[in-house]
Every structure is written in C-alpha cells, then in structure tokens.
Amino acid sequence: MKMNIRQTDDISTADVMSTRDDDDLPNVVDTECFTTFPNGWSRLRHIIREPAAEFIGTMILVLFGTAGNAQGVLFNNPNVSSSPAGDWMSVALGWGLGIDMVSGIGFGALVSGSTSGGHINPAISIALATFRGFPWKKVPIFIIAQLFGGIVGAAITYANYFHAISLFEGGPSIRTVPGTASLFGAYAAPYLSDVSAFWDEFLGTFILLIVLLSVTDKRNGPGVAGFTPLALFFTLFGIGMTFGAQTGFAVNPARDLGPRIFTAMAGYGRGVFNFRHQYWLWCGVLAPILGALVATFLYDLFMYTGSESLLNRPNEASRSRNMRSPDQECPKMPAGASAV
C-alpha cells in the first residue's frame, strides 16, 4: 500500500494506490479529492453564511410575530371578518413561536442557531460583544443582517394582509400611525409616560436575557437537549402576556426598527419615526440594548464563571499569585477558569 498526500491552501488530495501480487489482477487506483471550497459559490457562502443565518432567523421571527399581530387585530374588525380570528394571546404566541423557530437548538439549528449563534437581536449581539468576547468586527454585520431580516419579514406580512389592512383602514391609500402601523412596529399606549415606556421595554429585555443566559450556561446545570427554544418560547410568551400590552414588547431593536423602516417606505410616512418624539430610538432601540447590557453584567457578576466573560478575566495581581513552577500542582482551579 502506497499513499501520496499533496496539500495546498484550499485543497488536499490523497492518491491511494493498492497493488496485489497476483499478475492476473490489474493495479487498482482509488483517488478521492477533498476541498473546502469546491467552487466559487461555496467560497462566497463561507463568507456570508453567518450574516445570512441572522437575516433568515430575524425574518422568520418578525414574520411570525407581525402576522400574529395582523390576524389578532384585523380579524376582530367586522369590515374584515364576520367572526374574530385572534386575540392578545395569539399575538404573544406568534412572537413566542417566532423565537422558538429560530433559536439555539431544534428547528432553530436549521435556521441560525448552529451557524451564527442565533442572536437575531442587536441587543444580544452587543451584550455578548461587551461581556463575552464576541468579536466586535462582526457586530455591525450582524446588526445590518438582522435589520434587513426585520424589513423583509414585515414586507411579507404586509403583502399577505394588504387587502385586510385596506379594509380595516377604509381604503388602499389610507395608512395611519399608530393605526395599522402598530401591526409592524411597537407603539406605546397613549396614557403611558415616556419614562414608563422606557422602563417597560428595559424590563422585558432584561428578563429575556437573564433566561437566555441561564439556559445556555453549561456551568449552571447539565441542561436538557432541545430545552433552549422551549424556554425562550415560554419566556417571550410570558413577557407578551404580562408586560406586552403597554408598549408592544419590542425587546429587540431589529424587530421594531426593521418593520418601522418598511412601513415608512410602504406609505405610512415619517410619522412612524416622529411618533412621541422619536419613540423608536429611545424605547425601541436604546431601552432593549441597555436592558441586555445590565442583565448580562449582573448575570456575569453573580452567576457566570466562564473565563470568556470580561468580569472573570484575571488581573495582573491574580496572574502573579497563580504563577506556578512546571512541577508544582495547583490544588484547585482558579476562579473564573474554564474546565471546558
């Protein structure tokens, strides 16, 4: 048996030659080629794979959620349907199913979880980059992909329910803010103060991140296969059922800003951005980001022991104290060290 292996940057070729002493049998040559990039598209796909996963994941999240909004609101109007076809529970279920379909394990592994980590939320990307070592160079790319996913998801829902929206509004040229714009973006109730609206979104995102960090923390318990999407489903469903009615529970800048950008282009105009003194910025974007940052900081401060956390990295004094000679044993693992 003779084997010759030749390797380049992109391809390795193994030529395996098997010979037998029997003169009646010819030499048999088996050749197999293994390449990382068999063609130009595979190379491009390798580059765009993670942002594409974030795009598709966020699109599905927004598609499920906004379609649930549309069915829950439009089909309770007698001009659209003679019998109700949805309520606030169906709205919360829509957003819960959306995040269940695109997160971590199970179905989500086919969408974004196993490819990009399944952030589908700029607040999560920023929090992980700040405290968990997620590369900052990827953050702008992920956020852009997430925003475009939100835009496309909202556009699909709008196209699907265009006639129902027109019947609800009173004509295809009538689009009101908040009105049917609230089917796509999050708008606060009229009685709610700006501070209360900010706190509502901050609190919802804080709860979402605490649960997410807990169920994905391998040091917090052995975990159950497939439990992450189920936990996130019930978490977002619970947030919607308990904190959602006042602001629409955006808890995700891409879920609010992406559809809001689409509605501005679809005939709703600048009103979607001028609502309540740029509500979209301080409540739809800043509140979720701040909620995610505070949640991650507190979880890492009191619970998380992984070495990738910013709060668990050893300082100079700790490095000096833990210096050991090659033949000296350390009686126990230093705080913050990773066993994985």
Image (cartoon, grey):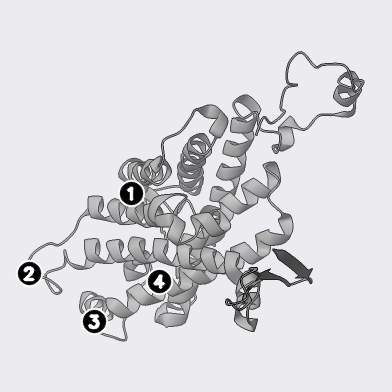
Circles 4 and 3 in contact, beta carbons < 8 Å: no
| Residue 122 versus residue 226 in the image, above or below | below
Q: Residue at x 60, y 74 (%)?
A: 45
> Along the polypeptide, which appears first: circle 3 or circle 1?
3
Cα distance in 3D space between marks 4 and 3 = 15 Å
Q: Which residue is mark 1?
A: 245
Q: Nearer the viewer, mark 2 or mark 4?
A: 4
CB of mark 2 within 8 Å of CB of mark 4?
Answer: no
Q: What is the three-letter code of the residue carrying label 2?
A: Ser
Residue contact at pointers 3 and 1, CB within 8 angstroms:
no
Q: Is residue 169 visible?
A: yes
- Whichever of callouts 2 and 3 sits on the residue coming sooner in the sequence is 2
Q: Earlier in the sequence, mark 4 or mark 3?
A: 4
Mark 4 — residue?
154
Q: Is residue 7 above or below residue 224?
A: below
> Percent from the top left, x then y, of residue 182?
36, 64
Q: At x 33% / y 46%, what residue is drawn? A: 237
Determine the CA span between mark 2 and mark 1.
Answer: 25 Å
Tell me the kind of residue under disc 4.
Ala
Q: Is residue 91 left or right of residue 211?
A: left
Q: Residue furthest front?
A: 23
SS assignment at label 1:
helix
- In the rendered image, the residue lying farthest to the left is 82
Q: Report which residue position mark 2 lands on.
A: 82
Left or right of 233: which side holds 223?
Answer: right
